[in-house]
């Protein structure tokens, strides 16, 4: 039935196509459906594949997907990507949401950069190889909103992951992880709000690594720390806390294990703070 509707569809353009595969289906059929949507100039494409068949097979998307000139919104939720091209070209893409279980080293460097008009990027990874030297490159000149949600696949004490963020007009940032990789920022001078919940509450050995992240977002105006960030700061050296000269609103989540030094530290780091809660 779906095949008949897709092929007999008379309109020259498909504005939105949503593919949700829960049960095991033939991957070639999904390939065909996506190809037809691309041929019809799809603008919004939402692909959610939860079938185990796609997890263990060598399924790949149509290569035309990664050079589609009409796509404005692309959302993908699946286990992993196979046969992904080394370069992509989305001249019209403004929103990219990617949720994956696995992501290889090569894709980490190529998947999230070189989008000329991308404004909204969401990345969720369920099993990051934290102990491997993997570089996640997020370099997008028009990016305004970035959300990262990473979970480690192991109990590594020290992560070798690096996350490079080059987004000169970024305004809204949300970072969430459970293993504290190295974050590096390049000139996020326009940052308005940052919501940071990184690290593990029991990380002690490399807690000072959080300061590299905080120095990169020191121009922010609204700042929120989650319980994991507060726990990491509790172990870190106070002398390395950067100055936040523009912060007017600062919120945080405490746990019973934390001591009472946080308010005094915040007052020193945020000289024009208006609200603390």
Image: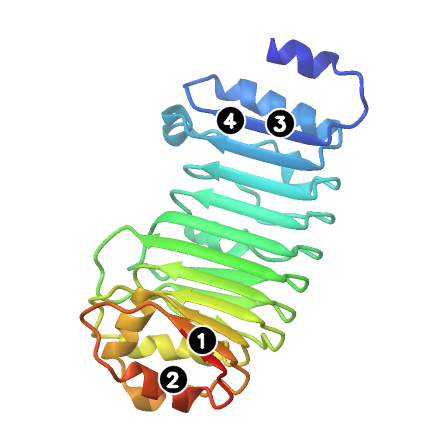
Does the residue at mark 2 contact the one at mark 3 (Cβ under 8 Å)? no
Between tags 1 and 4, which lies in front?
A: 1
Q: Name the residue under label 3.
A: 34
Residue 125 image position (x, y, % from top left): 40, 49
Residue 209 image position (x, y, % from top left): 33, 76
Between tags 2 and 4, which lies in front?
A: 2
Specify the label residue 266 is tagged with.
Answer: 2
Specify the label residue 20 is tagged with.
Answer: 4
Other-residue count near label 4 (Cα within 10 Å), few / some / many at <14 / 14–19 / ≥20? few
Image quarter of the N terminus: top right
Q: In this view, does 158 lie to the left or right of 72?
A: left
Residue 145 image position (x, y, % from top left): 58, 60
Q: In this view, does 14 lie to the left or right of 217?
A: right
Instruction: Residue at 23%, 78% (x, y): give it.
Output: 235
Residue 120 image position (x, y, % from top left): 61, 54
Q: Is residue 31 above or below residue 186?
A: above
């Amino acid at each position: 039935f779906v095949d008949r509707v897709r092929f007999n569809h008379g309109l020259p353009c498909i504005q939105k196509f949503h593919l949700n595969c829960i049960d095991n289906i033939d991957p070639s059929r999904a390939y065909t459906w996506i190809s037809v949507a691309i041929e019809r100039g799809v603008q919004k494409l939402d692909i959610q594949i939860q079938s185990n068949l796609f997890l263990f097979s060598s399924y790949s998307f149509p290569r035309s997907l990664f050079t589609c000139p009409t796509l404005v919104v692309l959302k993908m939720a699946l286990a992993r990507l196979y046969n992904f091209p080394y370069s992509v070209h989305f001249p019209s893409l403004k929103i990219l949401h990617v949720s994956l279980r696995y992501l290889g080293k090569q894709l980490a460097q190529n998947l999230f950069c070189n989008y000329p008009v991308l404004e909204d990027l969401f990345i969720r990874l369920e099993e990051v190889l934290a102990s491997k030297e993997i570089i996640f490159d997020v370099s997008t000149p028009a990016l305004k909103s970035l959300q990262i949600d990473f979970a480690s696949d192991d109990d590594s004490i020290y992560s070798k992951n690096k996350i490079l963020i080059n987004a000169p007009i970024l305004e809204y940032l949300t970072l969430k992880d459970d293993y504290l990789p190295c974050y590096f920022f390049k000139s996020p001078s326009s940052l308005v709000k940052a919501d940071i919940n990184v690290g593990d509450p029991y990380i002690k050995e490399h807690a000072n690594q959080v300061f590299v992240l905080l120095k990169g977002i020191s121009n922010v105006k609204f700042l929120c720390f989650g319980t994991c960030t507060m726990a990491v700061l509790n172990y870190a050296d106070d002398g390395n806390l950067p100055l936040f000269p523009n912060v007017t609103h600062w919120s945080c989540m405490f746990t019973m294990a934390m001591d009472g030094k946080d308010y005094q530290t915040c007052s020193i780091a945020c000289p024009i703070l208006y609200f603390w809660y």
